[in-house]
Image (cartoon, rainbow, N blue to C red):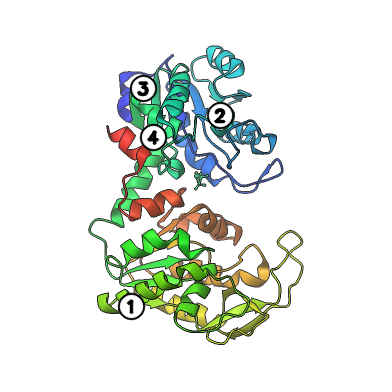
Amino acid sequence: IDDLVAEGVSGKRVFVRADLNVPLDGQTITDDGRIRAAVPTIATLAQNGARVVVASHLGRPKGAPDPQFSLAPVAERLGELLGRPVAFATDTVGDSAKATVASLGEGEVTLLENLRFNAGETSKDDTERGGFADELAGLADSYVGDGFGAVHRKHASVYDLPARLPHAAGYLIATEVGVLKKLTEDVKRPYAVVLGGAKVSDKLGVIDHLMTKAERILIGGGMVYTFLKAEGYEVGGSMLQEDQLDTVRGYLDRAKELGVEFVLPVDVVAAARFPDLKTKAPSDPTTVPAHEIPAGLMGLDIGPESRKLYAAKLADTATIFWNGPMGVFEHPDYAEGTRAVAQGLLDSSAFTVVGGGDSAAAVRQLGFDENEFGHISTGGGASLEYLEGKTLPGLAALED
Ligand code: 3PG
């Protein structure tokens, strides 16, 4: 982006592919971290006189307009953060987008409606995707890729559009890649990875890859129960992915051969029912040994002894990567495991990276100062796929 600005962007239409996929409660943005992260690139372009066309996806609409996934509330928040109005186009490549872009003056900013309202954005068909990218290219003179959270998607605005315009990487992508490089090249050891989240199937690739890179892998979240069951314990009514048991057993065996330590909870906070996350009504939690979860109870967080254990396992490390909450942190009865891991990161002297929308939101919702962590990534799937060593379409397109 610095090169692009140095060449001169004044009066030019610059397309910025950001990731403004923020959590919404109705029309209310519940965490604006991704919007704030997009500001430096957009502000720099606007300050240098560019006519800035910002675009993003939000949620997973089905290739057609769907009001619940409108970016309108995001346009308003972006305007507040930029300190300048953001003209909202009510479509992506239609009359509204064309007219709004045509009316932009130097240093003015527009946000297009959700890119995924057009089926071409996510199509697996190269021609359909390319057709949408052609239409988007008609709106701009150059392209800045800055939506780190979406670089693992082979989508029209991420992968096909940069091939059609002079392109550059924005500040957010540059920062994110710089940090993740520290977790893949010359990693300071001991290196611990904390993985949480609901499904083990979402983390298979990263577990497989990181087993040869990290000294320690701490497991939390819904994944725990598939690991416990694979070790032969009863997990009561806890979340379980039966079809992953053999894979997990394979990991546990391989970890022994490699000398990698898998850390599992010794106790869990459990309840008879999943808690109400809207009312947050008290849910009668009880702590039980992780190896004897009674039938009729489901594990929903790691327990107090496990919190101490996990903090101790993080204390003497030099690098920590954390992705995924330890429990149902959205309810106060099951937030302590996630809080303890966040605190464990801060109490260690390690270089700490928090990756993923959920963990980043958890850190903020639990009241931690995000600036105290080494880095909080805006990308969940993207950071995991980067750490797996995969080629990410949105980065490859910018390097080309
Ligand atoms: C994310 O939230 O991880 C990114 O915005 C990508 O969204 P997606 O998983 O719907 O492609």
Q: Which residue is mark 2?
A: 118
Given residues 390 and 309, the one toward you in this image is 390
- The amino acid sitting under disc 3 is Arg
- Gap in angstroms between the C-alphas marked 1 and 2: 46 Å
Given residues 77 and 279, the one toward you in this image is 279
Position of residue 222 in the picture relative to residue 260 (left or right): right
Badge 4: how crowded within 10 Å, few (<14), some, or many (20+)? Answer: many
- The amino acid sitting under disc 4 is Gly
- The amino acid sitting under disc 1 is Asp
Badge 2: how crowded within 10 Å, few (<14), some, or many (20+)? Answer: many
Query: Is residue 391 in view?
Result: yes
x and y, in percent, of residue 108 in the image: 53, 20
Of badges 1 and 3, the one in the foreground is 1
Q: Which residue is mark 3?
A: 164
In the structure shown, which secondary structural element does the residue marked by tag 2 occupy?
Answer: loop
x and y, in percent, of residue 368 in the image: 54, 61
Closer to the chain start, of discs 1 and 2, is: 2
- The amino acid sitting under disc 2 is Asn
Q: Quadrant of the C terminus?
A: top left
x and y, in percent, of residue 167 in the image: 34, 26
Closer to the chain start, of discs 1 and 3, is: 3
Q: Residue at x 56, y 12 (%)?
A: 103
Given residues 23 and 300, the one toward you in this image is 300
- Gap in angstroms between the C-alphas marked 3 and 2: 19 Å
Q: Residue at x 70, y 40 (%)?
A: 27
- Gap in angstroms between the C-alphas marked 4 and 3: 17 Å
Q: Which residue is mark 4?
A: 170
Closer to the chain start, of discs 3 and 2, is: 2
Q: Give the label on residue 200, or none.
A: none
Q: Give the label on residue 253, or none.
A: 1
Which quarter of the figure has residue 173? Answer: top left
